[in-house]
Image (cartoon, grey):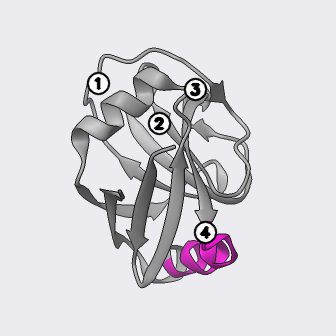
Amino acid sequence: MRAIRVTAGPYEFMARLELAAAPKTCATFLSLLPYRQRIIHVRWSGEACWIPLGDLDLGLGYENHTSYPAAGQMLLYPGGISETEILLAYGGVAFASKMGPLAGNHFLTVTEGCDKLGDLGKLVLWHGAQEIAFDACS
């Protein structure tokens, strides 16, 4: 198991890579580390935050994909009918865009700090974009 530290706004989470279920997505994500970006609230999907990546082509297809992630699950949508993105669910989610339903690769699951996911979601919703950082842990 490879652990990832996720720092978003004032909150810190530990997450587990889903190496067996999404090996290509995990390998691609690991190649990006350390990764820094800003996270914003979703428009269409419900209780989630996302990192828009525009037309970034990571060379990925679908693996371990879902439209209904549970709180604490992170998806990487590889692009296609909508832009490439990373989505972090903090509550009920039906992953979608203005183009309609989407499915993203579940590649990372929050294992510590889950009780703060809702707080992060509300912070992003009411106060705007927050810095987010992903770092590999030993």
Rendered residue at 60%/74% (across/down): 113
Image coords of residue 30 (percent x, y): 31, 39
The residue to which callout 2 is attached is 76
The residue to which callout 1 is attached is 58
The magenta stretch spans residue 40:
no
Q: Which residues are magenta?
A: 112-123
Pick whichever of labels 1 and 3 is earlier in the sequence: 3
C-alpha gap between disc 2 and disc 1? 10 Å
Image coords of residue 100 (percent x, y): 62, 29
Q: Amino acid at mark 1?
A: Leu
Check disc 1 and report its element: helix, strand or loop. Answer: loop
Q: Does residue 128 sit above or below 58 in this rendering?
A: below
The residue to which callout 3 is attached is 20
Number of marks drawn: 4
Rendered residue at 45%/46% (across/down): 2
Q: Which mark's residue is nearer the viewer, 2 or 3?
A: 3
